Image (cartoon, rainbow, N blue to C red):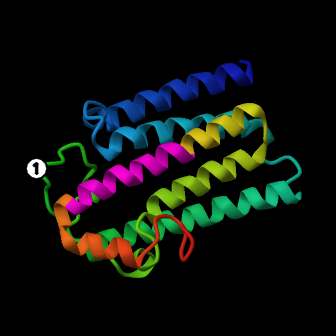
Amino acid sequence: MDSLIIRTIVFFILTLFFIIVSRRALLNPRSHGFYRFFAFEGITFLVLHNHPVWFKQPFSLQQSLSWLCLFFSIILVIRGLKALRTLGGHRVRHTSPENLTFENTQHLVQDGLYRYIRHPMYTSLLLLAWGAFFKLISFETIGAVAFVSLSLFLTAKVEEVENVKFFGPQYVEYKRSSKMFLPFIF
């Protein structure tokens, strides 16, 4: 079977999976999960589109930059999830039924990675997208990585509104003392 056909089938299977996982969020455009769905779609496109060249010239500068982004993406997602689990606790949020289980923290997490950036999980997704993008730069992938970056920015902005409602002034102060995605920068 042709590689493009296989990648297209995989794309549609993963899209179906993301629709199922995000079904409640997709019904509420005011939830951060709505925008995150589109980021997942863009990342899926980037990974599958660039899959044929994933391991070509693995030590070139472009590929090295890609591997670096992908490596830090993995580190951030692991550390971020661990911090949410150990420091955040769990509390059902009846006002946000579209949230995924791990997102419903009881306590505002401000330690570890969260001391420097408010959204290490989204930074992880950004690095994943840019890492996949650097595998093969083309007009299609430039558009896709820009789309993912915008989707994740909107995801974070909407989530911050939700967090101010849930955590109140504590989150407003936290926003003043941390950056959104990149420590000390942005």
Q: Main secondary structure of the magenta part?
A: helix
Task: Name the image quarter holding residue 44.
Answer: top right
Q: Is residue 152 magenta?
A: yes
Place of residue 109 in the rendered image (x, y in percent of width and height, measured from the top left): 30, 74
Q: Is residue 165 left or right of residue 73?
A: left
Q: Residue at x 45, y 76 (%)?
A: 113
Q: Is residue 119 left or right of residue 43?
A: left
Q: Residue at x 60, y 53 (%)?
A: 128
Task: Name the image quarter holding residue 136.
Answer: top right
Q: Residue at x 22, y 75 (%)?
A: 170
Q: Is residue 17 above or below residue 180?
A: above
Q: Is residue 166 left or right of residue 122?
A: left
Observer-nearest of 13 and 112: 112
Magenta region: which residues? Answer: 149-164
Q: Residue at x 23, y 65 (%)?
A: 105
Q: Which residue is mark 1?
A: 94
